[in-house]
Amino acid sequence: MKKVTLLLFILLQPFCSAQNLIVNGDFEQGNKFFSSEYVYNPVSGVQEGNYKVDKNSYNWWAIDTLSCFDHTTGKSNMMYVNGATSANKRIWYQTVNVGIHDTCTFSIWVVNLIKDNPAELNIYINNNLLKTIKQSNAVANEWKNYTFDWIATTDKATIAIIDKNTAAMGNDFGIDDLSFVDKYIIKPSSIYFPDTLANLGMENYKIPLKVKLYEKKISFVNLAYTAKFKFKADVFDLKGLTKGTILKDSLDNSNFRNITIFCDSVNINDTNKLLTLLIGTVLLGDRTTPLDITDFQWQSPKLKIAALIDGSLTTVSCPFFVWHLTYYNPIQLKIQPNPANDYLEINIEGDEQGYFTLSLYDLQGIKINEKTWQRDHRDHNANENFSMPLTNFSVGVYKVVLKTPSSVITKSLMIIK
């Protein structure tokens, strides 16, 4: 049965729950995380082209005793500016990461510190003029808000503020609570395993994990995700991924391998996109296994899961391959003593050739020991013996798992002290 998780579509309004992409836009962290071509001078603002980040403008200008407080609480930081007499100096600028084709909203609060000859602020993004803010010269010490939308054509936005007014007299102002947020509707996505068909014994077989989007002409860049899924251990032996990292690989009591993977960067520019390929060997276990997606998390607020859709892996064989395997004596796994104390003797009999893995799992399915080897030739009734020290293992129940090119054999082990 396919699993479906319903998605609640929510319109994120700017300045509420959307994330501010500007760092320290309210200046509460002081004179940090932004750049300026003005001179930082917290002592005196007499010289044009100076600024400070503080809680009060009192006595910053020798000719002015006006106290102006920040827009938000009246007790926090803001940026005080004495406009420069030279053109094109950036008062404030910062580069942020954005999504291509996203609509973003820039917001700024501006106040006249002296009502005469107010600033005329040009807002630039990536060196292109977005808007010009013309403050009224009738009022001082009154905050005004300005907001403008911008559509991203690249994955970065360099936002800059330049005072077009170069007059020496007047032209003193403050800015506060700068924000730059995505203005978007959450996009739904489905994660799915397609049903796949493979021949028995195939090595380096690839199973695709895919994402489906429901809107065209949208793209996402450098997305990260975490995925969890499971399948029967005696049908498919996972060796690796084409993209991403295996964070966890455990075996449960039902002989299912539970896998957790992480990928730090994937680009999506189509309605159907391959996320990664599972690379492994198709084993001679059951004929089929479900490919169950148990969890999936995008590391992005822009993309949500509408459905997790399971698939299956079905194995087939040609008559020649089955006939050929009849000449093999089946692999047998013996362990002793059981219960064990200080050591474990492991005996493997059979004449199968290929890649072998011997693993020890604890009761939680965590792999705690592993040995791998390859038989390059076939010896009739070949025997292999291994001794495994157990002095560092805790008392409890464990699983010894032998993976061969054609099967998976599991034995329970009790360790006592």
Image (tube, rainbow, N blue to C red):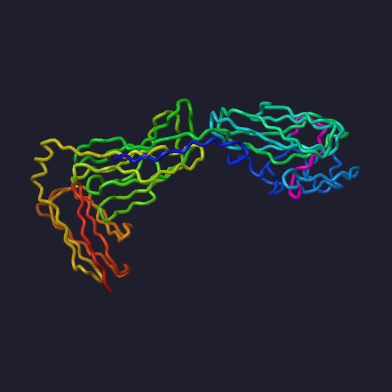
Of the 4 image quadrants, the one containing the N terminus is top left
Q: Residue at x 10, y 36 (%)?
A: 319
Q: Position of residue 412 (x, y in %)?
A: 22, 61
Say above or below: 197 vs 353: above
| Direction from residue 46 to residue 373 in the image, left or right | left
Q: Residue at x 56, y 35 (%)?
A: 98
Q: Where residue 257 sits: x, y (%)? A: 29, 50
Q: Residue furthest right?
A: 63
What quarter of the picture does the C terminus occupy? Answer: bottom left
Give the camera-side residue of 206 and 293.
293
Magenta stretch: includes residue 201: no
Up-down: is 234 above or below 167?
below
Q: What is the tally of numbered marks visible in this picture? A: 0
Q: In this rendering, would 264 be left or right of 238?
A: right
Residue extending farthest bottom: 417
Magenta part mainly helix, strand or loop? loop
Task: Tell me the magenta residue range.
Answer: 74-89
Residue 186 is situated, as x and y percent measured from the top left of the image, at 50, 35
**Based on the displayed image, in which of its 4 quarters is residue 297 positioned?**
top left
> In the figure, is residue 145 to the left or right of 291?
right
Residue 88 inside the magenta-drawn segment: yes
The answer to which quarter of the image holds residue 80 is top right
Viewer-proximal residue among 55 and 262: 55
Quarter holding residue 410: bottom left
Point out residue 35 in the picture as x, y percentages from the top left corner: 69, 40
Between 215 and 28, the one nearer to me in the picture: 215
